[in-house]
Image (cartoon, grey):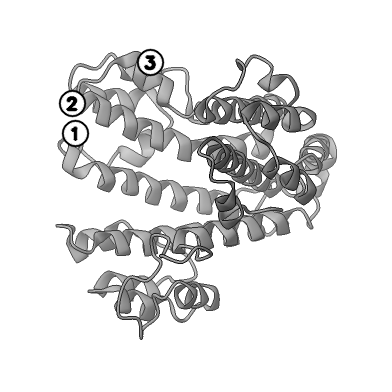
Amino acid sequence: MEGLYFNVNGGYLEGIVRGYRNVLLTGSQYGNLTQCENIDDIKMQLGPSYGDALASLPPNPSTSALADKTTEKLVQDFRYLQGQATGSLAKFMEYLTYSYMIDNVALLITGTLHERDTKELLERCHPLGWFETMPVLCVATNIEELYNSVLIETPLAPYFKGHLSHHDLDELNIEIVRNTLYKNYLEDFHHFVNNDSEMAMTPTGEIMSEILEFEADRRAINITLNSFGTELSKDQRRKLYPDFGKLYPEGMLMLSRADDIEGVSLAVSGVGDYKRFFDEVGLNQSSSGVGNMAGGSGAESKSLEDLFYQKEMELSKLVFTQQFTHAVIYAWVKLREQEIRNITWIAECIAQGQKDRIGNYISVF
């Protein structure tokens, strides 16, 4: 059924997305970027890929302005596709925006707690997580009003209702709130791709299950590592883990009981990729310290998060070897986001006169 659906609607959109994939920056183009002397040179090199998106930038713009404009291009392309999607593909693309909505709502909660300027908050929100009633949230004068607005005015209402109360929305709990929303979102998305009549038992369901399982595991590992030395109890920690993934259930149970990095390493050792990541950054069971969890001290070393990003890019590239799958849109978004991170990193290194640092964190696909 999915193949027939794609012939009518998704096949057309898939062709557009595969065209977008072909204009991602190549290794040689990255090589040209690393030879640039200033941001204006970078703008010129990006012209063929980003076209008019960078035209409104002033001479020698800031790296943040460059990042904003390249992100705007991604959002513009995504919205163009979304406007033509129908059926399960339209719903699938809605799910892709929910993670950005969660970050935006968390930002608005934090801003409300600190009585920040409404305009400033909205400007900092990610455009892919924008929804029509978002400005309404900024009208709230206290957390209870904001909570009630979230339940009524946003697509995230199901992830709040029955899981969080307005008493949870305080500064100490904001990361717990964010991770609770992500847990509920990932479980819902996973259920959708495996049970929707147009996706169950299809390449989309299979591919997205693997991708979402990886994301669930990554979040569980990061939550555990970040919980050490905090007041987050083991019971609270376990409630933040998604109830699926390659680590589920035994590995998740072990993570919930871990007291230190060695315990986390043992919990993930049953999954080859994760064991390798921990070995590479010195977080294996024989490690005496935190190793390179946050980047390490070596010039060429990578952090655990770098390796997670690298795995995410590998999974995204593999999606393009498949035909007739909604997952190609998810993968394209992730690859474009990494491209934007690459461009921003190169621009920052050039602006700071540290071009020798560029190669360390560039992921080319």
Residue 66 shows in the view: yes
Badge 3 element: helix
Task: Tell me which residue sits at (81%, 53%) in the image.
Answer: 323
Q: Of the two numbered discs 2 and 3 on the same chain, state the one appearing first in sequence.
A: 3
Badge 1 element: helix
Residue 15 coordinates in the image, percent (x, y): 83, 39
* Separation of residues labelled 2 and 3 (CA atoms): 16 Å
State which quadrant residue 89 falls in.
top right
Residue 355 coordinates in the image, percent (x, y): 59, 46
Location of mark 3 (residue): 135
> For the residue carrying disc 2, how many other residues have a C-alpha within 10 Å: few (<14), some (14-19), or many (20+)?
some
Kindly indicate whether the residue at mark 3 contacts the one at mark 1 (C-beta within 8 angstroms).
Answer: no
Q: Of the two numbered discs 1 and 2 on the same chain, state the one appearing first in sequence.
A: 2
Q: The disc labelled 1 sits on which kind of residue?
A: His
Whether residue 361 sits left or right of residue 222 in the image: it is: right
Residue 195 shows in the view: no
Q: The disc labelled 3 sits on which kind of residue?
A: Pro
Badge 2 element: helix
Location of mark 1 (residue): 166
Query: Residue 144: which disc?
Result: 2
Front residue of 38 and 196: 38
Residue 237 coordinates in the image, percent (x, y): 25, 60
Task: Tell me which residue sits at (63%, 31%) in the image.
Answer: 38
State which quadrant residue 174 falls in.
top left
